[in-house]
Image (cartoon, helix red, strand yellow):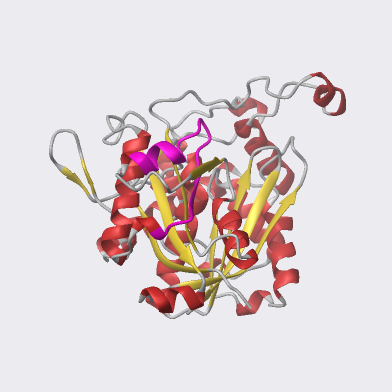
């Protein structure tokens, strides 16, 4: 039976909006990662059957392939999310033998589409009112699950503390492909990690989407900053990995997508997790690490409350609140961080889940090899 394995998982450091990576075109950032994959693995890019690339703001995969100097025979397709899922399905089905999955985003170069009217008249009949907006959705999640501003800020401080500890302890080293900046300096660490924050400093921030006297709790401090960055995985089958002399990190054990209410839009990681556990035949106690997207603090907190997972296993190296949230690369970044953490800590099963547009989410279980 064919399988899908990850033989290398890399990401760039994540830059803040208008920060260090803002001067690098996302095609060039993507090409940098493709080059890094070949350098780390020694693979001939001519054997790659496809490059499946996520980008929330444009078609970039084919251009990145050519910019990396790879053969013109290597195609590339751009998706918004689920690049790794599509790659795994293609491997298992026999469509691919070797494939790259990942994504990129440059928040510095594109406007946030959230809240724009992207839905049309018929959608509006079913869901009347203002167009869905991620920030308002985060407020609705916090309200529905009863999270206070203090709880959200405490979680955010923890994300920064864990990310700083991971950075200082060298835990991001193997997953990072440092980037040479236009000024010739090397960026080898995530730009958004902040140390020394307190509840008082976070409490001084104004709410962004709903006024405090109207119950607003979401601020720039307990939401993820839009970021610039890319992540990529070289994937193949177990049999082909042996033929190519590659050592897999993990196998894609189970991959699912799920939908939920598109107005609160950020809650779908909960049913996606339930669905992937049910389909995998594993129970919650067998999962040794969880990566849950930190678009806003209420998202992982609601997930934690409903799923009942061990909080100490959640985002052990920090999350998007500290690292940043480059949309098209977010899913691959989660899985890259998870795969390396599983290898470092000898964890057999890990689960990653993240919300997508329209009240959707994907969830993936990796098995260490």
Horizontal and vertical percent for residue 94?
61, 65
Q: Is residue 191 left or right of residue 330?
A: left
Vertical side of 363 occupied by 3: above or below: below
Horizontal and vertical percent for residue 342?
45, 73
Vertical side of 361 occupied by 214: above or below: above
The N terminus, quarter of image:
bottom right
What stretch of residues is rendered in magenta?
47-66
Vertical side of 227 occupied by 87: above or below: below
Q: Residue at x 68, y 23 (%)?
A: 118
In the image, is residue 300 part of the stretch drawn in magenta? no
Q: Residue at x 36, y 40 (%)?
A: 66
Kindly give the residue lying farthest to the right in the view shown.
125
Is residue 192 something one can see in this rendering? no
Horizontal and vertical percent for residue 145?
71, 48
- Residue 295 picture quarter: top right
Q: Residue at x 74, y 70 (%)?
A: 279
Kindly give the residue lying farthest to the left in the view shown.
184
Q: Is residue 94 left or right of residue 38?
A: right
In the image, is residue 58 part of the stretch drawn in magenta? yes
Is residue 265 something one can see in this rendering? yes
């Amino acid at each position: 039976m064919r399988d899908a394995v990850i033989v290398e998982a890399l990401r760039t450091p994540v830059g803040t909006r208008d920060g260090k990576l803002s001067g690098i075109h996302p095609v060039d950032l993507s090409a940098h990662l493709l080059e890094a994959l070949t350098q780390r693995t020694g693979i001939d890019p001519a054997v790659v059957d496809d490059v499946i690339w996520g980008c929330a703001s444009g078609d970039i995969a084919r251009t990145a392939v050519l910019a990396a100097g790879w053969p013109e025979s290597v195609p590339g397709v751009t998706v918004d999310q689920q690049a790794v899922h599509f790659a795994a399905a293609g491997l298992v089905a026999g469509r691919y033998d070797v494939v790259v999955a990942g994504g990129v985003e440059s928040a510095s170069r594109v406007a946030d589409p959230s809240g724009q009217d992207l839905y049309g008249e018929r959608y509006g009949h079913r869901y009347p009112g203002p167009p869905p907006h991620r920030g308002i959705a985060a407020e609705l999640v916090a309200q529905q699950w009863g999270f206070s501003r203090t709880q959200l800020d405490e979680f955010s401080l923890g994300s920064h503390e864990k990310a700083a500890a991971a950075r200082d302890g060298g835990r991001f080293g193997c997953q990072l492909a440092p980037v040479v900046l236009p000024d010739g300096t090397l960026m080898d660490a995530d730009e958004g990690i902040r140390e020394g924050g307190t509840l008082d400093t976070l409490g001084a921030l104004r709410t962004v989407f709903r006024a405090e006297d109207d119950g607003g709790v979401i601020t720039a401090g307990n939401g993820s900053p839009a970021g610039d960055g890319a992540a990529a995985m070289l994937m193949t089958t177990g049999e082909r990995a042996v033929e190519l002399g590659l050592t897999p990190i993990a196998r894609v054990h189970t991959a699912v997508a799920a939908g939920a209410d598109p107005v609160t839009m950020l809650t779908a990681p909960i049913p996606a997790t339930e669905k992937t556990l049910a389909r995998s035949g594993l129970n919650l106690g067998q999962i040794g690490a969880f990566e849950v997207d930190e678009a806003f603090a209420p998202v992982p907190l609601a997930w934690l409350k409903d799923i009942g997972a061990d909080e100490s296993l959640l985002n052990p190296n920090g999350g998007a609140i500290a690292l940043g949230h480059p949309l098209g690369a977010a899913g691959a970044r989660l899985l890259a961080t998870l795969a390396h953490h599983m290898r470092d800590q000898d964890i057999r099963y890990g689960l990653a889940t993240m919300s997508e547009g329209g009240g959707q989410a994907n969830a993936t279980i990796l098995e260490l090899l």
